[in-house]
Image: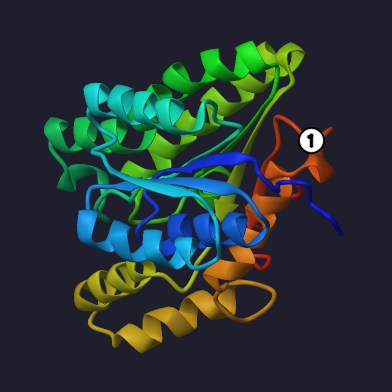
Amino acid sequence: MELDVNRKIALVSASSTGLGKAVAINLAKEGANIIICSRDSEKLEIVKEEIQRMGRKVIAIPTDLTQYSQVQELVKKSIDFFGRIDILVTNCGGPPSGEFLDFTVLDWKKAIDLNLMSTIYLCKEIIPHMIKQQYGRIIMITSVSVKQPIQGLILSNVSRAGVAGLAKSLSNEFGKDNILVNIVCPGYTQTKRVEELAESLSIKQGLKTEEIIQEWEKKNALGRLAKPEEFANVVVFLASERASHVTGVALQIDGGLVKSLL
């Protein structure tokens, strides 16, 4: 199937590792030119070189997404270089694991800045450009926790739920401008973030890291963790012309982990 993302300009945030990197690589494989960003400039350069070897245009801009001024500069540099942004994939790291009483008010603020405000900043700066061109695809990477809260991840459960509310609101407001907004909800995927979470839980529960991962695998219908590439394939589809009548959707990519009907 031809996805028609060839020569589109895609900005993928937090794209030096994990799901963000996988999405950036897969979009490049389908012919898109890419803007990558994260706080880790060294890892960004590695991803940049990988995309360049595919023959795609790519710029790497070190950015702290929790700082609005840096997001403004990211978007300005991107528009100056490419002239437009067709696809925005919002992504960020997850906040620490823990229960409600484990965290201070400052911890809550950091989590909301990381997950929700960073997404708001990106949308605020990019949507006006998409309105001018009467075209845009926005995919927000969240978590299955927006459909089924995860025990021990209360900061993520709450802050990512805000992203879901934002996405649905934006999809209603800007559909008239041919801007489609969807969220994707990964379950347990083979990333460094998930490995670190398993290590943290193993210490708290007195189990081996492998045992934690095995328990997660048992919880979904497929009996295994997803590969980052499997997740990225779905994001690329939503960014493509083949998903031209899909907006306001929260799609879990979890191997059947969520048990609800919707």
Q: Residue at x 80, y 40 (%)?
A: 241
Q: Amino acid at mark 1?
A: Val
Q: Which residue is mark 1?
A: 246
Secondary structure under the numbered disc 1 in the rendered image: loop
Q: Nearer the viewer, residue 150 or 140?
A: 140
Question: Image check: 103 left or right of 126?
Answer: left
Question: Image check: 204 left or right of 15?
Answer: left
Q: Where residue 10 sits: x, y (%)? A: 55, 41
Q: Nearer the viewer, residue 63 or 216?
A: 63
Compared to residue 87, the image places residue 96 above or below, namely: below
Q: Where residue 13 sits: x, y (%)? A: 41, 44
Residue 28: name its quadrant.
bottom right
Q: Residue at x 52, y 26 (%)?
A: 83
Q: Nearer the viewer, residue 244 or 227?
A: 244
Q: Nearer the viewer, residue 192 or 67?
A: 67
Q: Residue at x 34, y 70 (%)?
A: 192
Residue 44: name its quadrant.
bottom left
Compared to residue 199, the image places residue 187 above or below, namely: above
Q: Count numbered badges in the picture.
A: 1
**Looking at the rendering, in which quadrant would you find the C terminus?**
top right
**Looking at the rendering, in which quadrant would you find the N terminus?**
bottom right
Q: Residue at x 74, y 20 (%)?
A: 178
Question: Image check: 5 left or right of 169?
Answer: right
Q: Where residue 227 sits: x, y (%)? A: 55, 74
Q: Is residue 15 visible?
A: yes
Question: Image check: 125 left or right of 93?
Answer: right
Q: Where residue 99 sits: x, y (%)? A: 26, 50
Compared to residue 76, the image places residue 208 above or below, namely: below
Q: Is residue 254 visible?
A: no
